C-alpha cells in the first residue's frame, strides 16, 4: 500500500519508492500552484464583472485538475485518507450546492457552476494528500509560494500594466497599487496573507532562510497592494493563533478565533441586522459604512427576501435581471445594482443556499475545522501544520466579512480556504511523518 503525507512507514526507502514519492510531490506542486496562482495569471484589468463561465481554460482546466487529483487518490493515496476525505458533512454540502441550482432562474448555469466548484475542491484535496511526507508537503508550499511571489514581482518590474493598477482602468483610485498575477488588489491580499503564514510555518519547521524570505516578500507585496485589511490581519492572526498556542495549547487559540470572528461578524454584517449593533459601531467609529458596504448589504437583504430560505443557486443572483431590473434604491447612498457580489462571503452563501444553507456552511467551514484543530494528532509535524491551516482559515473567515469568495470555483481565496479546512481534517485524523 502506498503511503501519503499523513501516514507512517518503515525507515528504509527503496529507490523505486523515492522516485514514486518525487513524482507524487511533483503532481502536488502542479495542483497547488495552479489552484493558488490560477490557470490564467495576469488576466488584465478588472472590468467590474467576473470572468465568464464559458472560458475554456477555466472550464476544462479545473476539471482536468480534479481528474488528476482523483487519479492520484485512486493510484497512490492510502485508502484511509480517501475515507477521511469522504466526510459526510462535506458530501452533504456538495449535494446542497448541486441541488440549489434547481431554485435558480438559470438552472443549467447554476448546475455547471456547482460542478466546477466541486471539481476545484476535489483538486485541492489532491494537493494535500499526494505528498509523501511533511518535508514533501513543505516543498510543495515553498515552490508554490515562490512561484506566485516571483511571477508577481516579475510583473511589477517588467509588466507593470498587467501587475499594477493603472489610472485609465475602471477603478482609477487604485492606480499604482500592486495586484501581481491577479485581477485586483483585493484578490492579491487574500493570497499574500496565507503566503506570509506559509513563511512563518517554514521558519518554525526549521527552514529559516526560506521561511523568512517568503514572509518578507509577502508582507512587502501586501504593503504595496494597499490592502489595509490584509496589513492589519496578518500580524493580528499570527499573534492570535501562535500566542494562544504557546499559552493555552489547542483550546485557547480556538476560543480566541471563535470570539474574534464572531465579534467581527457582529460589527460588520450584524450592524445592518441589528439597530443596537449599529449604534454600538457608530458610537465607536462614527460614520462607518465599510466603503458603502452597509448600503449594499441592506439592498441585498431586501432583494433576496423572496427566496431567502431556499437560495438562488451559484452565480444566479449577481448580476442577473433579479438585480439589474430591481427598483432603484433611492433611499441608499449609492446604486449597487451593477455590483458583482455582496462583498460579504456569508451573505453570498445565504443568497446561494438560503439561510439554512448558510448555517450548514458555517458548520463545515468554521465549527468542524475548529474541532479538528483541537483534535490534532499529538506530533510536532501535525501541530505545526495545524497552526498553519488555522492561521489561513482564520484570516479567510475574517476577510470574508468584507469580500466574497466562498464557493467561487477557482478563486484562489476559496481554494486556500478549502485547503485549510481539509488540512485541519487530515492533521486531526492521521500522523504526519517527517520525511521520506
Image: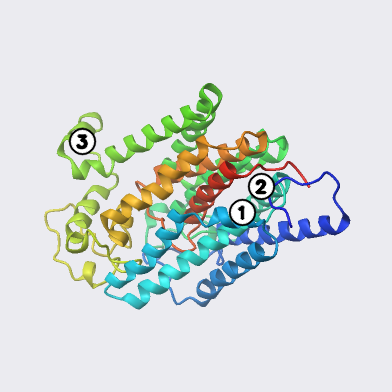
> Residue 312 at what x, y percent from top left?
28, 66
- Of 225 and 118, which appears nearest the observer? 118
* Disc with the residue nearer the chain's start (3 vs 2): 2
Q: Is residue 70 above or below residue 416?
A: below
Q: Is residue 393 above or below residue 112?
A: above
> Residue 196 at what x, y percent from top left?
57, 41
> Residue 54 at what x, y percent from top left?
45, 77
* Disc with the residue nearer the chain's start (2 vs 1): 2
* Kind of element beneath mark 2: loop
Q: Residue furthest right?
A: 15
Distance from Cα at disc 2 to Cα at disc 1: 8 Å
* Kind of element beneath mark 3: helix
- Of 289 and 12, which appears nearest the observer? 12
Image quadrant in which you'd find residue 367: top left
Distance from Cα at disc 3 to Cα at disc 2: 44 Å
Mark number, residue 81: 1
Location of mark 3 (residue): 277
Location of mark 2 (residue): 6
- Of 204 and 361, which appears nearest the observer? 361
Residue 312 relative to residue 403: left or right: left
The answer to the question of whether label 2 and label 1 lie on touching residues, with beta carbons closer than 8 A, is: yes
Residue 54 relative to residue 146: left or right: left
Mark number, residue 150: none
Amino acid at each position: 500500500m502506498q503511503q501519503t503525507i499523513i501516514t507512517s512507514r518503515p525507515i528504509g526507502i527503496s529507490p523505486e519508492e523515492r522516485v514514486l514519492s518525487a513524482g507524487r510531490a511533483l503532481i502536488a506542486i502542479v495542483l497547488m500552484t495552479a489552484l493558488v496562482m490560477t490557470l490564467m495569471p495576469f488576466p488584465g484589468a478588472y472590468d467590474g464583472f467576473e470572468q465568464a463561465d464559458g472560458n475554456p481554460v477555466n472550464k476544462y482546466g479545473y476539471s482536468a485538475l480534479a481528474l488528476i487529483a482523483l487519479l492520484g487518490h485512486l493510484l497512490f493515496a492510502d485508502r484511509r485518507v480517501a475515507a477521511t476525505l469522504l466526510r459526510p458533512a462535506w458530501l452533504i454540502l456538495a449535494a446542497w450546492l448541486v441541488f440549489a441550482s434547481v431554485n435558480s432562474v438559470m438552472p443549467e448555469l447554476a448546475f455547471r457552476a456547482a460542478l466546477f466548484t466541486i471539481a476545484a475542491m476535489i483538486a485541492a484535496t489532491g494537493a494535500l494528500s499526494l505528498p509523501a511526507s511533511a518535508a514533501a508537503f513543505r516543498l510543495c508550499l515553498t515552490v508554490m509560494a515562490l512561484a506566485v511571489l516571483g511571477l508577481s514581482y516579475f510583473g511589477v518590474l517588467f509588466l507593470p500594466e498587467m501587475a499594477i493598477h493603472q489610472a485609465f482602468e475602471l477603478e482609477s483610485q487604485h492606480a499604482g497599487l500592486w495586484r501581481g498575477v491577479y485581477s485586483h488588489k483585493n484578490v492579491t491580499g487574500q493570497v499574500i496573507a496565507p503566503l506570509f503564514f506559509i513563511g512563518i510555518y517554514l521558519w518554525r519547521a526549521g527552514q529559516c532562510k526560506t521561511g523568512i524570505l517568503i514572509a518578507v516578500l509577502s508582507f512587502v507585496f501586501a504593503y504595496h497592494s494597499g490592502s489595509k485589511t490584509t496589513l492589519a490581519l496578518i500580524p493580528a492572526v499570527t499573534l492570535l493563533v501562535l500566542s494562544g498556542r504557546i499559552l493555552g495549547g489547542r483550546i485557547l487559540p480556538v476560543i480566541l478565533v471563535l470570539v474574534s470572528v464572531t465579534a467581527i461578524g457582529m460589527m460588520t454584517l450584524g450592524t445592518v441586522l441589528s439597530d443596537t449593533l449599529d449604534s454600538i459601531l457608530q458610537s465607536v467609529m462614527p460614520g462607518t459604512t465599510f466603503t458603502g458596504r452597509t448600503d449594499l448589504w441592506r439592498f441585498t437583504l431586501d432583494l433576496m427576501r423572496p427566496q431567502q430560505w431556499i437560495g438562488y443557486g451559484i452565480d444566479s443572483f449577481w448580476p442577473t435581471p433579479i438585480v439589474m431590473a430591481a427598483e432603484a434604491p433611492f433611499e441608499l447612498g449609492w446604486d449597487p445594482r451593477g455590483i458583482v457580489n455582496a462583498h460579504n462571503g456569508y451573505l453570498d452563501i445565504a443568497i446561494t443556499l438560503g439561510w439554512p444553507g448558510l448555517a450548514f456552511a458555517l458548520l463545515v467551514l468554521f465549527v468542524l475545522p475548529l474541532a479538528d484543530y483541537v483534535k490534532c494528532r499529538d506530533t510536532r509535524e501535525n501541530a505545526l501544520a495545524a497552526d498553519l491551516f488555522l492561521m489561513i482559515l482564520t484570516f479567510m473567515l475574517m476577510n470574508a466579512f468584507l469580500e466574497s469568495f466562498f464557493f467561487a470555483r477557482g478563486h484562489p481565496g476559496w481554494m486556500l480556504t478549502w485547503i485549510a479546512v481539509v488540512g485541519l481534517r487530515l492533521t486531526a485524523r492521521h500522523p504526519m511523518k517527517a520525511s521520506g
